[in-house]
Amino acid sequence: MTTAMKCLAQLRGGRIADLVEADSSLSLDAAAAQLGYPAITRRRAIAAAQDEQRRRTVRPYVQDVADALAEAGEVEVLQDGDHLAAAILLHPEQPAQARPSNIPGRSLS
């Protein structure tokens, strides 16, 4: 599958997810049909719609966790539109121990 085909499936999946979110009585297949997507493209678009629905479901949880960590001073949260990133704050004075015994295939001997 080409990059263009993947992007088109993602865009279609997003539109299907939007339509199902607006009208919960619609199935994903019915939403794809209502949007006029050809039957041959529906399978990939529906798979992308399922992925989008999962992302939308977990987004509030991920945001709450990132906010709680940021409030505790453990991470810095960066947000750009729908993208969320959390970076662990490290300081030169923080103690850090190397534990080679925890690395698979390594031992202290």
Image (cartoon, rainbow, N blue to C red):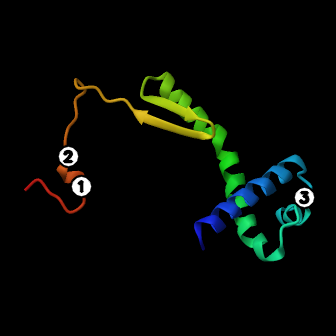
Query: In terms of secondary structure, where does tag 1 sit?
Result: loop
Q: CA distance from mark 1 to mark 2?
A: 7 Å
**Which residue matches tag 1?**
103
The residue at the point 60 percent across, 74 percent down is 1
Residue nearest the viewer, comparing 72 with 53 = 53
Q: How many marks?
A: 3
Percent x, y of residue 85: 50, 38
Check disc 3 and give the amino acid type: Leu
Name above or below for residue 31 compared with residue 41: above
**Which residue matches tag 3?**
26
User: Which quadrant of the structure image shows residue 65?
Assistant: top right
Name above or below for residue 10 compared with residue 44: above
Name above or below for residue 98 compared with residue 14: above
Q: Are marks 1 and 3 in contact (CB under 8 Å)?
A: no
Q: CA distance from mark 1 to mark 3?
A: 50 Å
Check disc 2 and give the amino acid type: Arg
Left or right position of 21 against 104: right
Labels 3 and 2: the sequence-earlier one: 3
The residue at the point 67 percent across, 58 percent down is 51
Residue nearest the viewer, comparing 21 with 100 = 21
**Which residue matches tag 2?**
99
Residue nearest the viewer, comparing 15 with 47 = 15
User: Which quadrant of the structure image shows residue 58?
Assistant: top right
Left or right position of 71 against 19: left
Query: In terms of secondary structure, where does tag 3 sit?
Result: loop
Q: Are marks 1 and 2 in contact (CB under 8 Å)?
A: yes
- Which label lies toward us, 3 or 2? 3
